[in-house]
Every structure is written in structure tokens, then in C-alpha cells.
Amino acid sequence: MPNAVASAVRGGGNMVYAIFSASVLLAIGAIYAGAVGWLYFRQERLLFEPDPLPADEPICADPDAREFFVDVPGARLSVAHMALPNPRGVFFFLHGNSGNLKKWFVELDAFRQANFDVVMFDYRGFGKSTGQIESEEQLHGDVLAVWKHFEATYAGKRVVISGQSLGTGLAAGLAAQLCSDGHAPDLTLLVSPYSSMQALAAELYPWVPIQVLRYPLHTLERAAKLLGPVMLIHGEKDELIPIHHSETLCKSMRTAQLLRVTGAGHSDVHQFPTVRQALASALGRL
């Protein structure tokens, strides 16, 4: 009889433990599912850090610069354009995931010396641009719309399509589109690029299913379609987007060159003299 009681007690204890364990696992599962769901619906706030500007605040005081809007479905995109009297070409630049044109549309003298116009625009919700980013397809559509606004102006002239950080995936997408249309850029320049946003997210957040990411931005896939010279610039100390992303991209393209910037991180790479010299040299060769 005592043995039977002891067995019953042990059995009851095991059952309590099993129920407790199941409850803990269910709670963890619910928390995980909730976190993943939150990421799915709120990822724009994590991926994009727009910095709005008042409508009456000037973007740039450069005498050759002007600002205006390009209308797209559901928004007006703020565009900055440095237009020289008789340019050799245009530098079409897509900026990173934060700030606005007031931060990015600067240091124009290098382009003036190379006799290149410069075009940049703010994504939806950035600077003076209206609307909000809702999908990767929308982003690519906005980039193409702004380019189409200038395409005829620079027909027959040199074209450089460039992007930095977030903008590299968009720049690669536009350059690939131009290549497929028979108008390959004279140079595609990617600064601190990622092989894909999906791959980068898997490195930074390995616990998140990649299917959750609605902005995969497959730079590597588009890079394979690029024709003509490609230059990659990457800081060797970049911890946000490690340099192996550029190494992967470089291996996938026969015409690509990778400039490894010693001592540079992610946000300061463009400030290094080697990068400025490389840019001036690349523009001078076109």
C-alpha cells in the first residue's frame, strides 16, 4: 500500500511537471509568434528612419541646385538636382535608410569638378516627400519614376547609377532595368552594399523566419544582370553590413571591382580620402 501511494504521488508529480512544461512552451511560443507578427507588420519602422523636413526649409544653397517634386501614385517625391551648364553626364544617387536630402545632398564640388550633374530624391515620408513606404515594389517603382523624369535630359551623356547602404539594392535594381532596356549605365557604384536584405536580416536576427521580411531586396540577383563597369566600396570595419557582402557581390560579376577601405565603418566610409579619390578617378575615366 505505501508503494502504491508513493507511485501515485510520483505519477501526480510527473503530470504536474508535464503540464507546467507544456504551459511554459505554449507561453514561449505565443510570445515568439507575437514578436514575429509585430515584426511583420511594423518592419517599415525598423528598416526606414525618415527625417521629415518643413515644406519651406531649403535643402541646399548651391547656386546650381534646384529642388522640385515628382508625382507618383499616392505621393509627391522631393527631388534635388544640381544642373551644370554643359554636363558630361549625371550621377543618380539613392541614399540610405535615414536622414533626408539636407543630409545627403552635400559635397557637390567633386561632381562639379568632374562636370557631372547630380540627382537625388527622398523616399516617401523622408524630407519633404509625402506618403509612406508600403512595399519593395513601390520603392522600385518610385526610383524608376524619378529616373524617367530625367532620362531624356541625359540621353547620349554618361550615366552613373549609385546607391549607399539601403540605396544599393535599389540602385542595382534600376541599373539592371536599364541594362534590360538596352541602356546600360556607364558605371554602377555601390557603397556599403548587401547581397540581399534577406541575407543580412538572417545574420542580424537569426531567430526571425526570413519569410517574414517583406523587403528582401535581392541585390545579388540583380547584380548578375548588370552590364558594364561596377565599382563596390566597403569599409573593412563595417559591422552593420559586413564586407563579405561586397565580396560575394564582386565574385558574381566579371566587371566588378571592390575597393576595401581600411579603417572605415558603415557611416563614415564616404569621408575617407581613398573613397573621394576613387570617385574622382572613376568619373574622370568616363
Image (cartoon, rainbow, N blue to C red):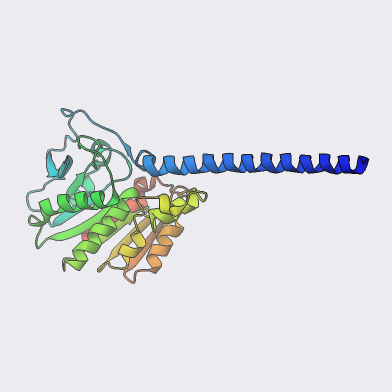
The residue under the point 49% across, 48% down is 205
Judge whether residue 3 can be spotted in this image: yes
44 vs 275: above or below: above
| Quadrant the C terminus occupies | bottom left
Residue 176: quarter of image: bottom left
Image coordinates for residue 236, horizontal then vertical, percent:
46, 53
Judge whether residue 261 can be spotted in this image: no
Is residue 278 or residue 247 the one in the foreground? 247
The residue under the point 43% across, 42% down is 37
122 vs 115: above or below: above
Image coordinates for residue 71, horizontal then vertical, percent:
12, 43
Residue 190: quarter of image: bottom left
Image coordinates for residue 138, horizontal then vertical, percent:
24, 49
> As drawn, is 42 to the left or to the right of 158?
right
Residue with the most extreme right position: 2
58 vs 273: above or below: above
| Quadrant the N terminus occupies | top right
